[in-house]
Image: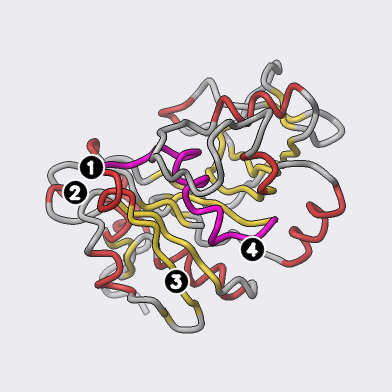
Amino acid sequence: MILAAGRGVRMRPLTDVTPKPLLEVQGKPLMQWPIEALAAGGFTELVVNTDWLGEQIPLRFGHRHAASAISYSHEGRDFGGALETAGGIVRALPLLGDIFWVLAGDVFAPEFAFTGEAVDRFAASGRLAHLWLVPNPPHNLRGDFGISPAGLALNDAPVKHTFSTIGLYRAGLFAPPYCGIPAGNAQGAKAPLAPILRAAMEEGRVGAELYAGDWTDVGTPERLAALNQKKRPARGGP
């Protein structure tokens, strides 16, 4: 599942006319990068949630992009607004399997590899979620979660890292006792993800690992401009 329902307030005025996941980084819409990375790993059945200017996303990608089949969960159309992360995931559960990836469509991680091996390890672990954390960027120096020596995500730790938004999940995380919203979220309940994850972490049911590859939360026009400038070849170069 690719999360693409955010308003992108900090990206204004760019997002006044374009949803943030469609803003271009190095010649491609932001969300095209994970679509292609997932397909490269063999994950070609995608769900995308939408809200703000959400009609632009299926107009851009349709229901198939290259090898990937795309289904949509139109939160704005169905409920008048985004359902937050957990609410959006629960809404999409009928379209998802028992184990599935979730990531934000506005995060740039071009080197991240979505692999079947990662899914197999997660399935064998019996855990409810597995998160990829990254070194803390300047806008989140306190971090979000720690990692135990056994590879468990921790609410409290002397060293915390930032949640990359990339994770593997079991549908069971979005059921009681962690989440009380019925699968399909027919009422359009809004719910954040962090409290659900933290409750499961307290029971030792969330794994984590540190990802050291290129990663950017494209949250401001300045970060977007820096990404596009970073890879631009120097004049007169080869």
Task: Tell me if label 3 and label 2 are in contact, CB under 8 Å.
Answer: no
Magenta stretch: give its range. 81-98
Tell whether 10 sits left or right of 40: left
Quarter of the image where one finds residue 199: top right
Q: Is residue 52 visible?
A: yes
Which residue is the site of mark 1?
A: 11
Tell me the quarter of the picture where residue 39 sits: bottom right
Picture coordinates of residue 209, whole percent (x, y): 72, 42
SS of the residue under disc 3: strand
Q: The disc labelled 3 sits on which kind of residue?
A: Ile
- List the residue tagged with mark 3: 70
Q: Residues within 10 Å of mark 4 (few under 14, many from 20)?
A: some
Asked if the residue at tag 2 contacts the one at tag 1, i.e. Cβ–Cβ closer than 8 Å, the answer is: yes
For residue 205, above or below residue 66: above
Report the residue at 72% width, 25% height from top. 154
- Is 234 left, or right, of 163 in this rendering? left
| Between discs 4 and 3, the one toward the N terminus | 3
Mark 1 or 4, nearer chain start: 1
According to the picture, the residue beneath numbered tag 2 turns out to be 15
Residue on which disc 4 sits: 114
Task: Please tell me which residue lies in front, 87 or 226.
Answer: 87
Q: Position of residue 162 (x, y in %)?
A: 56, 33
Q: Main secondary structure of the magenta part?
A: helix
Residue 222 in view: no
Q: Are marks 1 and 4 in contact (CB under 8 Å)?
A: no
The answer for how far apart the CA atoms under marks 3 and 2 are is: 23 Å
Q: Amino acid at mark 1?
A: Met
Question: How much space separates mark 1 and mark 4, taking CA atoms?
Answer: 27 Å
Amino acid, disc 2:
Thr
**N-term-proximal mark, 3 vs 1:** 1
